[in-house]
Amino acid sequence: MSVLVYIESENGTFKKSALEVASYGRCVANSLNTSLCALVFNSKDNATLGAYGVNKVLNVESTHPFTAEAHSNALKQAVDKEQSTVVILSNSANSKYLAPLLASDLKAGYVPNVVEAPSSTSPFVVKRSVFSNKAFCNTEISTPIKIIGISNNAFGLVEQVVDITTEAFELENISSKIRVEGVDKATDKVSIADADIVVSAGRGLKGPENWGMIEELADVLGAATACSKPVSDLGWRPHSEHVGQTGKPVATNLYIAIGISGAIQHLAGVNSSKTKVVINTDPEAPFFKAADYGIVGDAFEVVPKLIEKLRAFKTQNA
Amino acid sequence: MHSKFNFFLYFRGIDKTTQTMKILVCISHVPDTTSKINFTNDNTGFDTTGVQFVINPNDEFGLTRAMWFKERQNATVDVVNVGGPETEPTLRKALAIGADAAIRVNTPATDGFAVAQELTKIAKEGDYDLIIAGRESIDYNGGMVPGIIASNLKASFVNNCIQLDIEGDNATAVREIDGGKETLNTTLPLVIGGQKGLVEESDLKIPNMRGIMMARKKPLTVLEPNENQDFTTSISFEKPEPKGAIKLVDAENIDELINLLHNEAKVI
Ligand SMILES: Cc1cc2nc3c(=O)[nH]c(=O)nc-3n(C[C@H](O)[C@H](O)[C@H](O)COP(=O)(O)OP(=O)(O)OC[C@H]3O[C@@H](n4cnc5c(N)ncnc54)[C@H](O)[C@@H]3O)c2cc1C
């Protein structure tokens, strides 16, 4: 028996969400009194995983780009080899892509958006967010093998240093019906999915020409930029920045909403962020009911000042 | 296009591209995005009192893209829902938007895996070339239905699909990834998990009077489910803890905000 975690990297380093997956895996392995294995692609830094409780790394050397079919197949082979009964993934686009393929192959129940350690392992019960973060559901998985996807920043990073061994993992018959023709990805920017801080702006900014200060603020904070739905519908910002119930979910440590009213569909998607700050001229804006900190004020005055003060703060604390 | 029938036509030298593509759009029936979410029976069931149900927004983008294939490439479009009789108005709406026929599998949708098994059966029997579902339903956010159907059918699968073009048996799709997008190439049969981007928001189809009239005469077939076992069970629901009161900071006192974020929230 074992618990298996799927470890994702970005430009050769483990994603923070991957280390969170390992931390969660360690917690489940402790409850089940078993070992924690990790499936990794092209890893050079296994010691890091040992610090988050991974006992054994199965390392695949591969030059192929990610395809869900191939990675799901690799996980299946790892499950067979290690007799895993629980498989843990992140909530990344790639994890969510391959999870149902794996679930179908293993005839395993799959629960995504899990926000806490299992409340019980027999029966196996996890808490997941539902209705786009408007509620939670305690869900029992009744199949012999369980697959769970954990929400970003919900469980957090938990260090537990263990001895770690690495094994080269040769895969059999990895193929895919999908060919990757091209990837278009900004390499100099942190993505909304991986960001610790997201700076988001809405229709209150009046027009696309005013986003310079939003990008500057994001830059100072090392944050990703996001926007409300109408802003992307109007073409002020790309669709990929649209967050909320029908856009991307956001689960960051800090979410700063500027000139966003806080409509129910917007809040649904961003509510699980730990700390929310709102900057809005209208004290009646619904976002003030959902945020932790707020400034009633004009973004065009507040944001430049905030940038200036944060720069000073950063230099002081560097 | 991949059916035996078309295969013979192909061998007789008839151009495949003149054959019609068969599309199945899976429609989830979900609470309108403005719904207040409440629970009944000691927090074990969803309270539908006063809740309006709509076509799942992710599926709506897929349905509109299917209509595009119908108009430009002569495809036929069927819609399917797994659910009780209460979901029929949602299917009628899809017919009014322009789908040709609707199927309802008469069983409550309680588990993503079981729903996907029902849909797989419909997809197999109808020999569809393209199956469109949403990347997730906005109620249970399970996000597994299209992938499981694809795996069951051994069909190609593209999730988070934001662009789709089909020529003959060839499909080019764009998938949204974290921080960018990826262009993919594959062949039919294909299953996609669709979302916003598949068509522009402004191109979403709204039923008109004529569509609504015509929808009344279109077939809506009710099929009984198979015996599928649920893999997961929703035991109980909870609402988020009520939030503490907001701390307001004066617009002239930005230092105070930075102090709170640094020392209290510890996020910078
Ligand atoms: C089916 C459906 C799905 C939806 N899904 C989403 C979704 O996923 N995400 C989403 O965001 N929305 C979604 N919406 C839209 C949502 O209902 C709101 O319309 C939208 O979130 C409003 O965007 P906004 O806050 O940018 O604009 P507005 O509501 O117009 O708010 C602008 C705000 O800016 C403030 N403001 C104006 N000037 C200034 C200034 N100088 N400084 C500071 N503040 C200023 C105003 O006081 C106001 O509060 C959805 C709607 C529907 C029907």
Image (cartoon, helix red, strand yellow):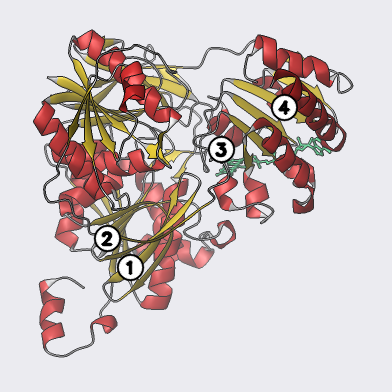
What numbered label is drawn on residue A244? 3
Q: Which of disc 4 and disc 3 is earlier in sequence?
A: 3
User: Which residue is labeled 4 in the image?
Assistant: A278
Quarter of the image with the C terminus of chain A is top right
Task: Have a look at marks 1 and 4 and say if they share a chain.
Answer: no
* SS under mark 2: strand
Task: Give the residue at x 70% y 42%.
Answer: A215
Please state the horizontal and vertical placement of residue B229, each as a whole percent of the image: 14, 32
Q: Mark 2: few, some, or many residues within 10 Å (few <14, many ≥20)?
A: many
Dot 1 amino acid type: Ala
User: Which residue is labeled 2 in the image?
Assistant: B190
Q: In this view, does A97 lie to the left or right of A136?
A: left
Task: Have a look at marks 4 and 2 and say if they share a chain.
Answer: no
Please state the horizontal and vertical placement of residue B10, each as a whole percent of the image: 15, 84
Task: Have a look at marks 2 and 1 and say if they share a chain.
Answer: yes
Judge: label 1 CB < 8 Å from ligand 1.
no
* SS under mark 4: strand
Which chain is mark 2 on?
B
Q: Can residue B245 be seen in this view?
A: no
Task: Give the residue at x 49% y 27%.
Answer: A133
Judge: label 3 CB < 8 Å from ligand 1.
yes
Distance (Cα) linking label 1 and label 3: 29 Å
Residue that lies at the very extreme toward the bottom in this rendered image? B13
Q: Which of disc 1 and disc 2 is earlier in sequence?
A: 1
Which chain is mark 1 on?
B
Dot 3 amino acid type: Gly
What numbered label is drawn on residue B171? 1
